[in-house]
Image (spheres, rainbow, N blue to C red):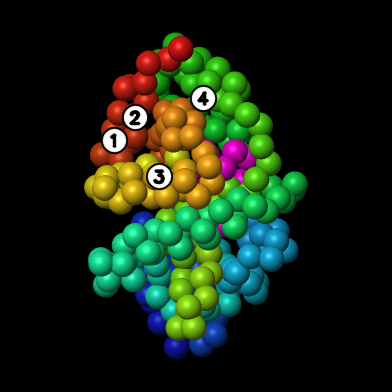
């Protein structure tokens, strides 16, 4: 690690490049269970035929857990969108095409999205009546088994110099209903204050996948509630506002 170059850090992890390897070093507060689960998810996804960084090893570095991947040369789709705003719609179309490819895959050993969401809803600070309504709506949604990335955003897609897209960061991958994954991406854009891009993304996805926009919108309060459990205060408040505006049937 002595020659490794730090190129990303936040409160929970640091990411380094060391030659042809990418090293994700987790904070000491990050649980062993979560690190090993992310590595296991990555290993399972590698068998699906998608372009992704390959898992190399899991190890300890200076008392911290670390996962080592192949380094993918290129720019994130977010960087490209920032550098070429006139190509936003073109990039969104590519973004949706990649997401549809992910959703076309199945991986029976992955955790079920519905189970994860039910558990998270029970952990929220919402009142019992609202939690009941959310659980009821979640149980009423169609049960699917598509691969759902769980954090599908332009910064988790790397475009190589040759134009080949790679999807990274599979820490939150599950199997379930693709429209829940779409709702999550829609909320991520909105969290960044990019409502216009969020709406354009949703329009493109629904058109390409022949999905009713109302169907994705039915997922929004469920996804927002489940995502509100952790994160910054202003993000929790924003996400919970999506729960409050819903009229339950």
Number of the front mark, 3 or 4: 3
Foreground mark, 2 or 4, reads: 2
Q: What residue is disc 1 on?
A: 238
Residue 42 horizontal/vertical position (percent) = 63, 61
Element type at marker 3? helix
Q: Nearer the viewer, residue 142 or 242?
A: 142
On the question of residue 64 being in view, the answer is no
Label 3–label 4 contact, CB within 8 A:
no
Q: Position of residue 54 (x, y in %)?
A: 63, 72
**Of the image marks 2 and 3, the number of the one nearer the N terminus:** 3
Q: Residue at x 34, y 71 (%)?
A: 80
Which of the labelled discs sits on residue 122, or is there none?
4
Rendered location of residue 85, percent (x, y):
25, 66
Give the CA separation, mark 1 to mark 4: 19 Å
**Residue numbers of the magenta segment:** 170-182
The residue located at (30%, 40%) in the rendering is: 235
The residue carrying mark 3 is 202
Real-space Cα distance between discs 1 and 2? 7 Å
Helix, strand or loop status at disc 1:
helix
For the residues labelled 1 and 4, say whether their Cβ atoms are less than 8 Å apart.
no
Q: Which residue is mark 2?
A: 242
């Amino acid at each position: 690690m002595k020659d490794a170059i730090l190129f990303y850090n936040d409160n929970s992890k640091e990411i380094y490049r060391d030659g042809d390897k990418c090293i994700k070093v987790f904070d000491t507060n990050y649980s062993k269970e979560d690190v090993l689960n992310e590595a296991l998810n990555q290993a399972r996804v590698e068998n699906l035929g998608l372009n992704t960084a390959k898992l190399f090893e899991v190890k300890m570095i200076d008392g911290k857990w670390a996962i080592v991947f192949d380094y993918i040369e290129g720019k994130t789709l977010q960087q490209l969108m920032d550098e070429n705003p006139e190509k936003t719609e073109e990039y969104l179309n590519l973004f949706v095409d990649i997401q549809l490819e992910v959703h076309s895959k199945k991986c029976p050993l992955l955790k079920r999205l519905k189970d994860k969401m039910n558990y998270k809803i029970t952990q929220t600070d919402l009142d019992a009546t609202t939690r009941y309504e959310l659980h009821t709506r979640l149980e009423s949604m169609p049960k699917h088994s598509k691969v759902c990335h769980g954090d599908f955003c332009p910064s988790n897609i790397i475009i190589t110099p040759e134009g080949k897209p790679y999807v990274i960061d599979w820490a939150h991958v599950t199997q379930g209903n693709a429209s829940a994954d779409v709702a999550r991406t829609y909320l991520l854009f909105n969290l960044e204050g990019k409502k216009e891009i969020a709406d354009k993304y949703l329009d493109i996805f629904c058109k390409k996948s022949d999905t009713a926009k109302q169907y994705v919108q039915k997922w929004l309060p469920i996804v927002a509630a489940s995502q509100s459990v952790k994160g910054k205060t202003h993000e929790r408040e924003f996400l919970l506002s999506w729960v409050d505006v819903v009229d339950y049937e």
